[in-house]
Image (cartoon, grey):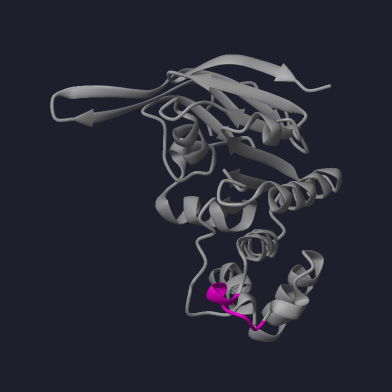
Amino acid sequence: MASGLKVNEKKIIQMQNVVRCYKMGTVEVYALKHISLCINEGEYTSIMGPSGSGKSTLMNIIGCLDKPTRGEYLFNGIPVAELNDDQLAEVRNQSIGFVFQTFNLLTTETALQNVELPMIYAGIKPDLRSEIARKALEDVKLSHRMYHRPSEMSGGERQRVAIARALVNDPPIILADEPTGNLDSKTGAEIMSIFKELSLKGKTIILVTHDPQVALYAQRIIHIKDGLIENDEKVA
């Protein structure tokens, strides 16, 4: 595949002059303006910015949920613009584990069934699905709640189910959007300790937040304002 970027195998995310423009009638609204960045494999990065800054748009593009209007995005060395819908779905299923602020759990299913869901799309056989899901719930200390539905669990427990679900296909990247936004400070700290542990195990963590304390768990903080990278700093 042709590309203007020099590919480095240690770079898992590469963006060059990425623009995302939305047309609202005759008006063009620029959510992202010429974003250029690289994220290394195994790096723990926070993306910070106020509401309307473009950080959620950037997360959607990184997660292959959206495509740039202009510019180039390489995911693991592959130009995303050249991928069709099925290929994008495969990238999302196999290479990215998503964790959302609102948990996005199926309310009618148990914790175990929710965690099994990505493996159904991946074509994994039922017995193996169950085994992997049970282990994932054990890893987030929820084995005692695997047959409970979301309505029977606390916010912290639901987020741990969401993290277990994000991990079952063993993706190299975990993409988290305000993962502590609906949690109290103590529960939020417990969730952030899980992300820290995943980072130490070599996962690439990309976390979107407006909370400076949450951002400080990362090795690097990218500040977004008005669709531009305002600052990109390493955390001591």
Q: Is residue 190 visible?
A: yes
Count of labels shown? 0
Q: Nearer the viewer, residue 230 or 34?
A: 230
Is residue 92 positioned above or below 147 on the image?
A: above
Q: Is residue 149 magenta?
A: yes
Q: Position of residue 141 (x, y in %)?
A: 79, 68
Q: Is residue 19 left or right of residue 59?
A: left
Q: Nearer the viewer, residue 11 or 133?
A: 133
- Name of the residue lying farthest toward the top: 230
Q: Nearer the viewer, residue 130 or 159?
A: 159
Q: Is residue 22 left or right of residue 200?
A: left
Q: Position of residue 130 (x, y in %)?
A: 69, 81
At 70% across and 32% down in the image, what residue appears?
Answer: 213
Q: Nearer the viewer, residue 227 or 13?
A: 227
Quadrant of the image occupied by residue 3: top right
At 61% across and 45% down in the image, what residue appears?
Answer: 175
> Can you say which quadrant of the picture contains the C terminus?
top right
Q: Which residues are magenta?
A: 147-152
Q: Position of residue 234 (x, y in %)?
A: 76, 20
Q: Is residue 138 magenta?
A: no
Is residue 128 positioned above or below 39 on the image?
A: below
Is residue 69 positioned above or below 202 on the image?
A: above
Q: Position of residue 110 (x, y in %)?
A: 58, 80
Q: Is residue 4 visible?
A: no
Is residue 45 positioned above or below 36 on the image?
A: below
